[in-house]
């Protein structure tokens, strides 16, 4: 038996949405095998990982808290990837957003009032945009691959944060822990309920805005054309450079907003581990959500579940928390693999006939 | 040993993993496949190499295990992008994420264990020669292997028929296919070679550079190796020169600290990453040459029509 790929005349619209579901199913099978290999009862382990967190209010809330930065970064990345811009340095833009947003609360803590919170958020967005503008500028001006430059800047951003919280921004009353002073009340994003804060609303607004932009406006069409067919875009008079710059800075700004929202709304201060890899997990959210803003929301919730499920499995089964990354990586691999069904039909042919036909061919 | 010798020795050991990984990726990219999963294959190689050495008691078997670890991940990548025609950039990222997770899980049992070190070679008289002795004759075996690898990859690509076929596949897969070259098979082998090299580079880190397992110990070296391929404009011998330059940037921080340069350590640690960005920008300034050098079919999907 020989399996061949036959290109479909048009992409299968059904498969666009079935493929992630199939990928999730395969991830569950993979998870069962993995748990069995680690010596756990696979069904119970999968229940603990993927179902138990959905059964109590605390972890449901925590899922939304973790999905918020993922969705904010993920929609921005969806826009960038659609424009064929490979911004994989969102983790760095998130970090710099968190740093820039913290400038006012850390350096001018005595400044209070209703204006401080908007100022903090704007600083965060600008920080993320500026950090993303560096690879964007290098790409349009010199043609350097944004893949490598944006990623290298992640390490630089993390070192910058590390230096700040251990050096100039270290809280003098913090018993020498590497952390900044706590944000004053006016600089903290107000809570909705429990640990949920208004950042989640901001994320939903960003999703709605990008859904309208991409699906309903000429500008969004421009991004998609430049991404899918740059030559066609050039003939239509769309600026490729403009789209690349815009896609990178918008995705960077959203990542920056995610960073400052997490620091101001959830953590309350800067410290070296403000992110469990949100910037990288959001790449998975973008693909799992079909590079579609609304899809990204669901994907973010699911990936947030993998974080919480990892904690749940660590407590109940004693498995390593590294399993979270394994699951997240596996989801992306299965999604990418299953996407073959969108553009191709699998064609099965017995070996002998294939060989015979090859001989007939001139 | 003088200070100068020590600096050269550390540059060589810092450059060797970069060189090995870059040579592997160079061959992969020459065949037209962009594998961004170098960092993931490298970290898996580091942990399987360390585990292999601990379990068998032989650092040489550890080296073999590191190559197998890298190849296992590479074959997954090859299946995705070659058989299933998946997007290469995204698949490479997925490989890195999966590799970081898997290595963390496998390595958990080995944290804090003292590792087995791949010993440096010691030839009587020669190694004791002043100035050049330790540098030329006192390295560990993988250092010599990496230089031999650079020369052999160069010879293979530009002086042999299979090397010509591999470059043809990377430059124009349709023509190569018409001429009867098996595009998918060639690419799969190139991807496997890249995986073995990346794994070996990781193994070098956990068996020779710092003989221990630390989570995330590759610290972006896989990405630097990717940049190195661009820096070398896909030429193996230039990759060797580049690797030593980058190795210099990597260890500059330690010596700068020892010299008491009054910069925060984080700034010095950021140097290699900034140097990589700078190198990429300077190199791509001349767009004409940059475009001319890269394999024309890099990153493009090939699905045989029959």
Image (tube, helix red, strand yellow):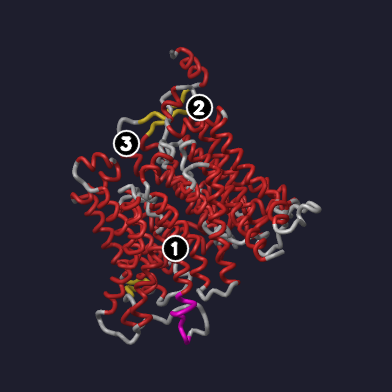
Image: magenta residue range? A164-173
Q: Is label 3 in contact with label 1 (beta carbons under 8 Å)? A: no
Chain at numbered mark 1: A
Residue A22 percent location from the top left of the image:
43, 43
What is the secondary structure assignment of the residue under circle 3?
A: loop
Badge 2 is on which residue?
B182
In three-dimensional space, the C-alpha distance between marks 3 and 1, rounded to whole angstroms, equals 38 Å
The residue sitting at 35% across, 60% down in the picture is A134
Q: Nearer the viewer, residue B79 or B271?
A: B271
State which quarter of the image contains the C terminus of chain B. top left
Is residue B263 among what the camera can see?
Answer: yes
Q: Against A151, is A124 above or below? A: below
What is the secondary structure assignment of the residue under circle 1?
A: helix
Q: In this view, does B303 lie to the left or right of B103?
A: left
Chain at numbered mark 2: B
Badge 3 is on which residue?
A11
In three-dimensional space, the C-alpha distance between marks 2 and 3, rounded to whole angstroms, equals 27 Å
**10 Å crowding of disc 2: few (<14), some (14-19), many (20+):** some
**10 Å crowding of disc 1: few (<14), some (14-19), many (20+):** few
Chain at numbered mark 3: A
Residue B280 percent location from the top left of the image:
43, 52
Q: Which of marks 3 and 1 is in front?
A: 3
Badge 1 is on which residue?
A55
Q: In this view, does B53 lie to the left or right of A271?
A: right
């Amino acid at each position: 038996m020989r399996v061949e790929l036959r290109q479909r005349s048009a992409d299968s619209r059904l498969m666009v949405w079935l493929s992630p579901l199939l990928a999730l199913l395969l991830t569950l099978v993979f998870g069962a095998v993995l748990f069995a290999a680690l010596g756990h009862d696979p069904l119970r382990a999968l229940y603990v990982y993927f179902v138990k967190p959905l059964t109590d209010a605390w972890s449901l809330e925590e899922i939304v808290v973790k999905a918020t930065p993922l969705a904010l970064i993920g929609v921005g990345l969806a826009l960038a990837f659609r424009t064929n811009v490979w911004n994989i340095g969102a983790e760095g833009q998130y970090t710099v957003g968190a740093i820039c947003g913290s400038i006012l609360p850390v350096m001018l803590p005595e400044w209070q009032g209703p204006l401080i919170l908007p100022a903090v958020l704007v600083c965060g967005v600008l920080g993320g945009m500026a950090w993303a503008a560096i690879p964007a500028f290098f790409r349009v001006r010199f043609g350097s691959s944004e893949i490598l430059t944006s990623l290298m800047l992640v390490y630089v951003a993390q070192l910058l944060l590390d230096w700040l919280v251990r050096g100039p921004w270290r809280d003098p009353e913090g018993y020498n822990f590497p952390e900044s002073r706590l944000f004053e009340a006016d600089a903290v994003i107000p809570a909705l309920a429990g640990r949920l804060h208004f950042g989640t609303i901001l994320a939903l607004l960003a999703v709605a805005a990008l859904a309208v932009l991409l699906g309903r406006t000429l500008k969004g069409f421009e991004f998609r054309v430049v991404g899918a067919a740059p030559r066609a875009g050039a003939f239509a008079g769309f600026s490729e450079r403009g789209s690349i710059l815009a896609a990178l800075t918008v995705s960077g700004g959203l990542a920056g907003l995610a960073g400052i929202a997490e620091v101001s709304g959830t953590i309350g201060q800067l410290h070296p581990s403000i992110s469990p890899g949100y910037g990288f997990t959001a790449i998975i959210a973008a693909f799992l959500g079909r590079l579609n803003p609304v899809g990204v929301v669901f994907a973010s919730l699911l990936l947030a579940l993998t974080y919480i499920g990892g904690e749940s499995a660590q407590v109940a089964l004693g498995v390593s928390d590294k399993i979270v990354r394994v699951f997240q990586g596996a989801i992306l691999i299965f999604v990418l693999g299953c996407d073959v069904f969108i553009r191709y039909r699998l064609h099965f042919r017995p070996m002998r006939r294939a060989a015979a036909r090859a001989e007939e061919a001139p | 040993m003088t200070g100068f010798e020590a600096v050269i020795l550390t540059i060589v050991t810092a450059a060797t993993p970069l060189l090995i990984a870059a040579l592997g990726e160079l061959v992969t990219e020459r065949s037209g496949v962009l594998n961004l999963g170098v960092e993931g294959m490298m970290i898996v190689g580091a942990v399987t190499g360390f585990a292999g050495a601990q379990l068998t008691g032989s650092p040489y078997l550890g080296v073999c295990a590191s190559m197998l670890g890298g190849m296992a991940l590479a074959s997954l990548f090859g299946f995705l992008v070659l058989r299933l025609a998946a997007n290469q950039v995204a698949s490479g990222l997925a490989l890195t994420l999966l590799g970081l997770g898997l290595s963390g899980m496998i390595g958990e049992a080995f944290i804090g264990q003292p590792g087995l070190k791949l010993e440096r070679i010691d030839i009587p008289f020669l190694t004791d020669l002043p100035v050049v002795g330790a540098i030329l004759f006192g390295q560990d075996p993988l250092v010599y292997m990496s230089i031999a690898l650079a020369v052999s990859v160069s010879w293979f690509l530009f002086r042999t028929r299979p090397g010509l076929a591999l470059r043809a596949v990377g430059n124009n897969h349709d023509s190569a296919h018409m001429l009867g070259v098996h595009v998918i098979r060639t690419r799969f082998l190139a991807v496997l070679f890249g995986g073995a090299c990346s794994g070996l580079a990781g193994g070098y880190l956990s068996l020779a550079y710092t003989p221990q397992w630390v989570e995330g110990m590759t610290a972006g070296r896989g990405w630097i190796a990717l940049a190195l391929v661009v820096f070398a404009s896909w030429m193996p011998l230039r990759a060797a020169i580049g690797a030593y330059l980058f190795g210099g940037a990597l260890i500059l921080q330690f010596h700068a600290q020892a010299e008491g340069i009054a910069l925060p350590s984080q700034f010095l640690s950021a140097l290699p990453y900034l140097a990589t960005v700078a190198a990429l920008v300077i190199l791509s300034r001349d767009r004409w040459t940059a475009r001319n050098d890269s394999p024309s079919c890099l990153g493009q999907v090939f699905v045989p029509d029959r």
